[in-house]
């Protein structure tokens, strides 16, 4: 790229990024939210870096072509993700330009060049992460920056491994692409650095009618669908370019792959009959802005008054459940819940509704008794000389029943890296001062080893708290414990009115399909709604709206194939990836020893 275009463009992007940064800092000082500003900042910042270092990307004369193709892949994957643009079908071709780059690099160099491939695939994955998840920076800028650039780095690993395997086993190269990517997603759902938001199967969350077969495969079925389609689309492109007779066959194979699963799903969607007895549920969305209002400015008594005022508008003698969002009240001693003023006031307000179950997210703490085993999240506080209190903080959900003093408690156990847990803190202990300066903690939040349900004479409910609703196999653990419906408690206002809270809502539709469980979803602000067993979103509230909604939720005992077997596709991919990696290693060593 000529300097008379490259340098002025880089300067223009630098000025845009500086302008956005100054605007965000200024808004922070006057308590205004950022909205889409991080998207503009990240794109301008990354575009500036790419233009400045474009000449160092590669010594090949094809570097601009490769940069253009990898940019195209990043854009296709980014805008194809839910609630960016209504074009999920772009995911079926999103990897194709990047796969072309990988193959051309191998031909250009005549061998595997991992560093060359890494530079272009990392560029693709940064763009994908920025376009689809820029809104994470609205919660905390540093955490958002880290999530985007580190997640792009992790995504690059399976692609570089695929490039290496394809050089030593060309016939199995694209099998390796599929196996390595699904293995990455499988691991990303399970380790402490988890950030599986961009799991490929989530791409269809906005269109549940197309993926009703997730009750058998979960989101890994959707990921497999997308990856296979990209491989067949690449072969169709090759057949078209070469003018071979295989063009018709390639077209038919790709069409069959796209249309048959979609057609099967539409048939399942139209013929599905919901199961289970109905329970009347009232969902409250109190709408307290979390950055400045909920945790800083608005007194809890005032917040509780809004909760109760909205609830009274909808609760009747037929109401079985009243659902409040995540961290509605606190801090509450988990052994003295009924003594907490807000809980006493709730019981007093609804004393005329015996049997009403109130389920709410709370901030809580647990004090360890002498001799009681302490968790990984233990903290200590010296109350007086020689008297140290050991305790843990909980992000929890409780169920109180009017007319019954018993309280059931569930501890959130799938934690958000950063705010709720420092991943592998024994390795990254040196980050403790920085994390505490950013108002995080290295102690983390207390959890429980297994899922549990909230039981009553009305049925058994899965208390899913915020981030937990992103993990399909994790949610099936509630179902195996007997949960007949899913209640999601969340606080999506951290992300402002951007794509984040809408994506989070749509992911819940996938959990409904996988488990065939109806869902009631309460957000502090964001979108509250009911979701039926087909994944349809009903009575969705508006963002930034204090409201209570009432609906009937079916309580079902049906068990799906996915509930029984979970992410079987992910486990098969993991086994396949291990075999392919071992073969790649052996063949590479043999080639090194060959004269």
Image: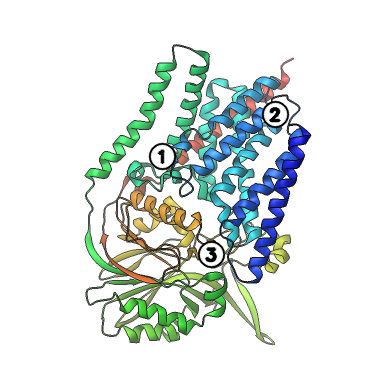
Instruction: Name the residue beneath numbered marker 2.
Output: 63
- Residue position for label 3: 494
The disc, 3 or 2, on the residue closer to the chain's N-terminal end is: 2
Badge 3: few (under 14), some or many (20 or more) residues near its Cα, within 10 Å? many
Task: Answer yes or no: is residue 370 visible.
Answer: no
Q: Can you give x and y, in whole percent of width and height, for residue 485 in the image?
A: 31, 60
155 or 394, which lies in front?
155
Q: Quadrant of residue 340?
A: bottom left
Question: Which mark is first along the chain, 1 or 2?
Answer: 2
Name the front one of labels 3 and 1: 3
Q: Is residue 30 visible?
A: yes
Q: Using residue 214 as the reference point, say whether residue 525 is left or right of it.
A: right
Q: Secondary structure at mark 3?
A: helix
Question: Residue drawn 68% across and 30% down?
Answer: 64
Residue drawn at x 44%, y 61% is 450
Report how far apart the C-alphas of labels 3 and 1 lie in the structure.
31 Å
Q: How is the image coloured?
A: rainbow
Separation of residues labelled 3 and 2 (CA atoms):
40 Å
Q: Residue at x 49, y 82 (%)?
A: 300
Q: Quadrant of residue 25?
A: bottom right
Q: Are marks 3 and 1 in contact (CB under 8 Å)?
A: no
Residues at discs 3 and 2 in contact (Cβ within 8 Å): no
Viewer-side residue, 130 vs 149: 130
Q: Is residue 526 left or right of residue 135?
A: left
């Amino acid at each position: 790229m000529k300097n008379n275009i490259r340098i002025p463009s880089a300067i223009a992007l630098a000025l845009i990024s500086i302008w956005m940064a100054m605007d965000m800092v200024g808004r922070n000082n006057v308590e205004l939210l950022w909205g889409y500003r991080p998207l503009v900042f990240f794109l301008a910042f990354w575009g500036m870096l790419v233009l400045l270092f474009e000449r160092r990307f590669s010594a090949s004369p094809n570097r601009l072509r490769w940069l253009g193709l990898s940019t195209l892949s990043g854009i296709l994957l980014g805008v194809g993700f839910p609630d960016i643009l209504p074009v999920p079908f772009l995911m079926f071709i999103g990897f194709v330009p990047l796969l072309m780059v990988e193959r051309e690099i191998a031909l250009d160099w005549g061998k595997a060049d991992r560093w060359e491939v890494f530079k272009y695939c990392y560029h693709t994955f940064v763009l994908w992460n920025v376009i689809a998840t820029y809104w994470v920076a609205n919660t905390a800028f540093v955490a958002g920056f880290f999530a985007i650039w580190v997640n792009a780095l992790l995504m690059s690993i399976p692609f570089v491994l695929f490039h290496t395997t394809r050089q030593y086993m060309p016939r199995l190269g694209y099998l390796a692409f599929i196996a390595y990517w699904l293995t990455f997603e499988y691991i990303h759902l399970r380790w402490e650095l988890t950030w599986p938001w961009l799991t490929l199967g989530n791409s269809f969350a906005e269109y549940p009618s197309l993926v009703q077969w997730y009750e058998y495969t979960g989101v890994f079925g959707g990921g497999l669908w997308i990856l296979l389609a990209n491989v067949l689309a690449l072969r169709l492109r090759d057949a078209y370019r070469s003018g071979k007779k295989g063009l018709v066959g390639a077209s038919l194979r790709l069409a069959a792959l796209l249309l048959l699963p979609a057609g099967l799903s539409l048939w399942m969607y139209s013929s599905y009959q919901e199961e289970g007895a109905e329970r009347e549920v009232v969902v409250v969305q109190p709408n307290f802005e979390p950055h400045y209002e909920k945790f800083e400015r608005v007194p809890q008594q005032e917040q509780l008054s809004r909760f109760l005022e909205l609830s009274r508008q909808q609760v009747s003698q037929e109401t079985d459940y009243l659902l409040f969002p995540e961290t509605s009240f606190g801090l509450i001693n988990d052994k003295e819940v009924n003594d907490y003023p807000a809980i006493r006031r709730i019981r007093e307000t609804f004393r005329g509704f015996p049997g009403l179950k109130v389920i709410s997210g709370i901030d809580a703490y647990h004090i360890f008794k002498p001799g009681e085993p302490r968790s990984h999240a233990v903290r200590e506080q010296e109350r007086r000389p020689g008297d140290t209190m050991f305790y843990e903080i909980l992000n929890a959900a409780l169920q109180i029943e009017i007319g019954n003093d018993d309280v059931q408690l569930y501890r959130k156990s799938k934690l958000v890296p950063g705010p709720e847990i420092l991943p592998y803190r024994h390795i990254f202990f040196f980050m403790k001062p920085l994390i505490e300066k950013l108002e995080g903690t290295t102690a983390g939040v207390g959890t429980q080893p297994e899922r549990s349900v909230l039981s009553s004479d009305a049925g058994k409910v899965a208390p899913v708290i915020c981030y937990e609703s992103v993990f399909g196999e994790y949610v099936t653990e509630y179902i195996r414990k007997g949960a007949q419906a899913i209640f999601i408690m969340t606080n999506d206002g951290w992300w402002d009115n951007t794509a984040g809270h809408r994506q989070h809502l749509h992911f819940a539709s996938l959990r409904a399909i996988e488990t065939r469980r109806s869902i009631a979803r309460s957000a502090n602000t964001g979108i509250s709604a009911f979701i039926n067993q087909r994944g349809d979103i009903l009575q969705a509230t508006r963002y930034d709206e204090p409201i209570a909604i009432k609906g009937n939720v079916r309580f079902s005992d049906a068990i799906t194939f996915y509930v029984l077997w979970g992410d079987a596709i992910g486990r098969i991919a993991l086994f396949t990836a291990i075999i392919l990696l071992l073969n790649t290693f052996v063949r590479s060593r043999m080639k090194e020893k060959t004269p």
